[in-house]
Amino acid sequence: MVFNIKFIKLRNLVTGGAGFLGSHLIDRLIELEQEVICLDNYYTGRKSNVSLHLNNPLFELIRHDVTEPIRLEVDRIWHLACPASPVHYQSNPIKTSKTSFMGTYNMLGLAKRTKARLFMASTSEVYGDPEVHPQPESYKGSVNSYGIRSCYDEGKRIAESLCFDYQRTHNVDVRIVRIFNTYGPRMIPNDGRVVSNFIVQALKGNSLTIYGDGTQTRSFCYVDDLIEGFIRLMNSQYTSPVNLGNPAEFKIIELAEKIRDLIDPNLQFINKPLPGDDPLQRKPVIDLARAELSWEPKVTLSEGLIKTINYFKSVL
């Protein structure tokens, strides 16, 4: 049963709150008249993403790195802090691993002390380069433990493990979401993700770079749909991992064609080799989200791309 937190005033801590997903979550929490503390070290987050709330008495902004402990009094912890794009998490892989482990460890310690419910943003990357397609929550994954992506993939796997160890050992109330590819306004233009890459290249009039032959697949969920899933999961009584993503599967070449046609149909494609350990297919099974949260994405890829392109036009 999903209930509406609009009628229950809670103190919410959002780590990584100035980032892409975190700032959209904060928008929604403020809309629901919740108290929000935003915690961010601005490694990939931007103060401008939350600046509209700076004068709101419900909102507080703290510059802090989650790898260091912090003492706060909160009712709910939304733990989103961690670089999530290959460009960023591979630029300092040791810090990425440390953020996943120590950041989650510190937030679980805070949750234990305050008896707060903790929501942890995990990822579809825990499935690695999947040998099962599409991927249900029961799939254990196929992850390269020492590859260039392992700092993020394995970091999130240990973060999940920590959450359930704290649940079993200390009775900490946890919620785990496995996030599949998400896009929308406030993506960082140079984050290396495929949607932002294609849009930025197209808006600049450059050829679109396709890694590999473009037949690898992804499933793209618009950010507003994902945040709705966050809210529903946090308010539910379901405590095992839940996939949130759009089950509509597209080849990368199909995404490139859609973006090119929306911006400039005359643009060309260029091909480059696939990066190491890049998954060849990715698609969520969302039966659990439908059953437990009454959730499924509403925004089509074309609708979401138009909104995202308009955002990039305003910032480039």
Image (cartoon, rainbow, N blue to C red):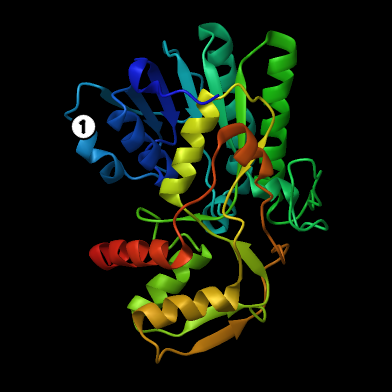
19 or 289, which is in the foreground? 289
For the image shown, how many numbered marks are present on the structure? Answer: 1
Within the image, what quadrant is residue 178 found in? top right
Residue displayed at 38% across by 71% down: 200
**Horizontal and vertical percent for residue 241?**
68, 34
Within the image, what quadrant is residue 282 found in? bottom right
**Horizontal and vertical percent for residue 148?**
69, 56
Q: Which structural element holds mark 1?
A: loop
Amino acid type at mark 1: Leu
For the C terminus, give its image quadrant: bottom left
Residue 120 in view in this figure: yes
Residue displayed at 41% across by 47% down: 224
Whether 59 is drawn above or below 178: the answer is: above
**Horizontal and vertical percent for residue 131?**
83, 58
Mark 1 sits on what residue? 54
Within the image, what quadrant is residue 107 found in? top right
237 or 162, which is in the foreground? 237
Whether 122 is drawn above or below 73: the answer is: below
Q: Is 97 placed left or right of 53 in the picture?
A: right
